[in-house]
Amino acid sequence: MSLEADLIRWGLTPDGAAIRTPGSDLMPVCWQGRAAMMKVARSAEEVRGHDLMVWLDGQGAARVFKHGGEALLLERLETTPSLAGWALTGRDDVATRVLCGAAAGVHAARVTPWPDLPGLPRWFGSLEAAQGRGEGFARAWATARRLLADQRDVRPLHGDLHHGNVLRSPERGWLVIDPKGLIGERTFDFANMLCNPNLNHALRPERLARQAALIAREAGLDHARLLGWVGAYAGLSAAWHLEDGQEEQARQSLAISALAHSLL
């Protein structure tokens, strides 16, 4: 199904230019007098994210107005203020607290049965494959394997929770968008926060230590397990960067992994 077909099917009026991302096609639209965002997935991974958004049912997340197949019609959220902008201009702690609050909305207990989503062991396949590419990858995989074998507080996860995936509703506050959709340990969902809003910022002196301590307090997490998940996730991110031919980003991600391990 295409954007144009879904515009007709759901009676939508374009309200801005189409946007193409690596995994989806999007378009701002109006639906029954409401500002909305039309999203059509181009990958199975994005469709799984749709399944999680439907399950979240607007609790801690943008509301889903309509869905079917690869298409999702969402509540349109504001892109300003920007959590990334806050983090990069001296308000890192404020942005981190907002992210922790958004995570709490996603992780809240629900009576509806969990959606059928992949587990974390499957998610870490690229890191397992990269473990022979140097000490950094081997250490990250060893940590990941240990944590995956002993997951705690398992539940549906966003899977890609960072500064760009939490936007503001004037009426409902800060809400998540664009999940990957996973099942696994709650602490994992906080690891990506510490690799963002960009790799240079994540590597600033004392930044990881300070923000990890803040997240552990705000979210009620075991500090050492959080650092372990950061070390594992940053290694996974490095493996993904290598798959995409992004050697400098892979080097920086491995540096974050090494820093997290040094703090354990």
Image (cartoon, rainbow, N blue to C red):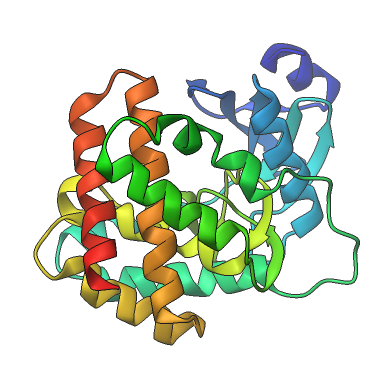
| Residue in front for this viewpoint, 15 or 246 | 246
Residue 151 is situated, as x and y percent measured from the top left of the image, at 63, 66
Q: Residue at x 83, y 46 (%)?
A: 116
Report whether 81 appears left or right of 73. left
Report whether 167 appears left or right of 107. left
Q: Can the viewer see residue 79?
A: no
Report whether 50 appears left or right of 60. right
Q: Residue at x 70, y 67 (%)?
A: 154
Residue 195 is situated, as x and y percent measured from the top left of the image, at 31, 53
Image quarter of the N terminus:
top right
Q: Residue at x 44, y 84 (%)?
A: 218
Report whether 65 appears left or right of 153. right
Where 130 sits versus 208, above or below? above
Residue 55 is situated, as x and y percent measured from the top left of the image, at 80, 54
Residue 115 is situated, as x and y percent measured from the top left of the image, at 83, 50
Where 215 sits versus 184, above or below? below
Would you identify the image quadrant in which residue 133 lies?
top left
Where 176 sits versus 222, above or below? above
Q: Can the viewer see residue 24?
A: yes
Number of dots carrying numbers: 0
Image quarter of the C terminus:
bottom left
Q: Residue at x 77, y 20 (%)?
A: 6
| Residue in front for this viewpoint, 6 or 84 | 84
Would you identify the image quadrant in which residue 228 lies?
bottom left
